[in-house]
Amino acid sequence: MKPLKVLVTGAGTGIGREIALEFARHGAKVALHYSQSGRGAKSAVRAIGKNAAAFQADFRDVTAIRQLARQAVKFLGGLDVLVNNAGITMNLAFDKVTPEQWDTLYQVNVRAQFFLTQAVLPALTKSRGAIVNITSIHAFQGFTEHAVYAGTKGAIVAYTRELAIELAPRGIRVNAIAPGAVAVENHQKVIPNFDPQAIGKLIPAGFMATPRDVANAVRFLASPAARYFLGQTLIMDGGTTAWMPFSEDYREPMRGLTFGKGYVPGI
């Protein structure tokens, strides 16, 4: 059996990096995209070996996105699985958001995913492959100061559903995963004294997910075992969206927490 040929975007850190590693553990040949986190992507390539390569692309630039598609497909010798994981976030009060900030999140989270998928479509059509989009529980529940981010994630859910129907006649399966709280590097950078165990106590499952949990779900959706999943968004959140909390926290700004530094203008 030939190894799967997989492209994972946003594979320099966290969930994306672990998705790439998980496919490689099961024998896949993997192309890892990164925007800024070259160190993480390249260390993953070293860990995997000759069956992996890292490619940089600025997801605000459609020309760079199309070049990534060409490079990845050439390296892989085709494409069986596209994992659209790349995404950025920020927290900012609705009335403070600038057009440039709004554009940046939609360019990276939505437009890049759309046009990358379009660019690799011939290769996926040939392999009758699978697409897995990463969205978020922010698409289903409101959280203060995340109006722009939540909008992008909701767009991915709707786009996944439509694209699955449009591409089904070509034999391509399209689905998505909406993770809840996942312990990743960005939380450690932003949240003072980040404590996954303490946060886990606030989640019905009793713990935060790890990137490996998401990677396992992605590999399942990309596999023949999930052949009857089409246009679905699997919510894996430890029960967060099943719970009806009553809290006054939404009345207060997110003091002391700033997501978006280094990649969103003005943050």
Image: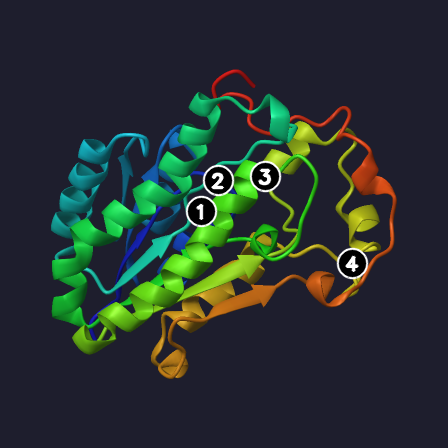
Task: Give the residue type that dot 2 points to.
Answer: Thr
Q: Are marks 1 and 2 in contact (CB under 8 Å)?
A: yes
- Label 4 sits on a secondary structure element that is loop
Spatial CA distance of label 1 from label 4 is 24 Å
Q: Which residue is mark 4?
A: 203
Rendered residue at 32%/30% (across/down): 60
Earlier in the chain: of badge 3 and badge 1, it is 1
Spatial CA distance of label 3 from label 1 is 27 Å
Q: Which residue is mark 1?
A: 17
Earlier in the chain: of badge 4 and badge 3, it is 3
Spatial CA distance of label 1 from label 2 is 5 Å
Q: Which is in the foreground here, disc 3 or disc 2? A: 3
* Residue 231 x %, y %: 39, 71
Task: Give the residue type that dot 1 points to.
Answer: Arg
Q: Which residue is mark 3?
A: 147
Rendered residue at 56%/19% (across/down): 267
Q: Along the horizontal axis of the image, is 53 left or right of 228?
A: left
Per the rendering, the mark at residue 13 is: 2
Tag 1: Cα neighbours inside 10 Å, few (<14), some, or many (≥20)?
many
Above or below 234: residue 121: above
Q: Nearer the viewer, residue 256 or 79?
A: 256
Q: Are marks 3 and 1 in contact (CB under 8 Å)?
A: no
